[in-house]
Amino acid sequence: MLTQNIPVIVGVSQILQRLSDPLLGKEPVQLMVDAVRAAAEDAGNAKLIDQIESVRVIRGVWRYKNPAQYVADALNLGNVETCGTPYGGNMVQNAVNQSVLEIQDGSKSCIVITGAENGNSQAKALKAGVDLPISDVQGTYSRMLDEEHKMSSDAENNRGIRAPIQIYPIFENAIRFNRGESIEAHQKRISELWAGFSKVASNNPHAWIQDPVTAETIRTASARNRMISFPYPKLMNSNNAVDMASALLVCSTDKARQMGIPESQWIYPWSGTDAHDTYFVSNRDNLHSSPAIRIAGMRALELLGMTTQDIDLIDVYSCFPSAVQVAVQELGLDDSKPLTITGGLTFGGGPLNNYVMHSISRMVELLREAPGKKGMITANGGYLTKHAFGIYSSEQPPEGFKHENVQPEVDATFFRESVDEHDGEVTVESYTVMYGPQGPVTGHTACLLPDGRRTWANVTDADTLLEMTKAEFCGKTGLVNKAGDIAL
């Protein structure tokens, strides 16, 4: 059993910047520096910053080249390793898994992971017609923690389907059809699910929206809750208009003892897994499940001889209701119990790829208050594409941190062929309707050919679009032409 290189999270921070004047705010790299300092203060020793050997920054929408070097320079860290990540909400947990493994094998003893966004300031600046100052941060990372992968196929791109607000509601409608629910019953159920997330946010001091929102308000379209894409109004979407930053300080127990970090601050990672479904949604078996969540999520538990019944606290990644429901189904979670500790990306706040740093930070706080309990984090990137899992506790794991590569097992699951264009009969597998200021503007459909291959097609007829929001169109047959239009 390891005695010196046992990995622990010793410091966490969450910073929320709320400003009426966006020109008075700090930009993301400055917020990252503040977050690292706050994490060291949380650990109980500001000098822990001097022990950092690697600065790891989660990719944001900003255009910095090497923000990790900016953070290192601002903190006078000298010649330390700087790491970046590709896009993806899975990357925080993935970075934790990689960092913990490096601490356990002795190649590192103290690592900081950080990230920040200023979406709220950006939105306010855009509305005011002003440009926010931004530092010209150049340079190259020492290394990348993962590779960037193309997430949209030509078949999807040809129909203009490449945004989360288009694809996650397509998953949602597939879930409804698979469950045999009516549109009304389904909308009521998912609004109640989201109201539960809002309730948790009301008790989270770090949540962006702390005033509880009712299920009726969430599901009812209004001037403040406009429809985005059927069946999602704004309050069922991730809230990216936030200024939020966070940091995690991870080190060995030996380093923590050297620096006098009290054990009451230590939270141990017990296990972690990572896997991805097919990079293109076009190649998924269906649009209401995730083999990668099932295999990787369950393996994180199985490595410890645990089941979901042994988990006391969980945060299920929640960019949209469909992501939560798929995870609940694949992991066998009890959705009558809280599925979040933050309030999720709508109410807790959705700083894009960095949300999971806030969920881990909150998990650390809660586990410190509940010795011996076990917490699970799920993370999702892309279009239910890339997944990462972590299990944590205030107690030391009996056999050290465990990690397993389950990708070969995921890759062995069903792979559906797709076609870029088709001329003939199809069956609608799922769909969504995109809204503009005046109402429905475009319908996107995922379609199955008679031979089982998948293709995509669009609807523009106004009467059909309106009907698609009132009646079930999954399972309907139609004719697609080579231009990608479908007649239903």
Image (cartoon, helix red, strand yellow):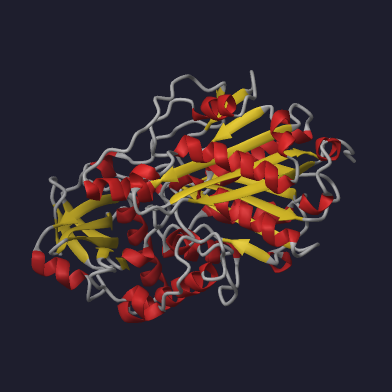
294 lies above or below 58 = below
Location of the C terminus by quadrant is bottom left
Q: In this view, does 296 lie above or below 251?
A: below
Say whether residue 59 is visible.
no
- Residue 44 versus residue 437: which sits nearer the camera? 44
Q: Is residue 42 above or below residue 134?
A: below
The percent coordinates of residue 100 (x first, y second) are 71, 39
Q: Where is residue 319 in the image (x, y as percent from the top left)?
A: 44, 57
For the N terminus, give its image quadrant: top right
323 in relation to 416, above or below:
below
Q: Is residue 216 left or right of residue 114?
A: left
Horizontal relation, residue 193 to residue 219: left or right: right
Seen at 12% across and 46% down, the residue is 483
The residue lying at 84 percent from left, 41 percent from top is 260
Q: Is residue 468 visible?
A: yes
Say whether residue 197 is left or right of residue 133: right
- Give the number of callouts: 0
Asked which quadrant contains residue 26, the reply is top left
Q: Where is residue 124 in the image (x, y as percent from the top left)?
A: 30, 50
Which residue is at the front of the view, 156 or 256?
256
Q: Where is residue 133 in the image (x, y as percent from the top left)?
A: 34, 34
Q: Which residue is drawn at 41% across and 45% down?
A: 118
Question: In the image shown, does 159 or 138 lie closer to the viewer?
Answer: 138
Residue at image point 56% right, 43% down: 92
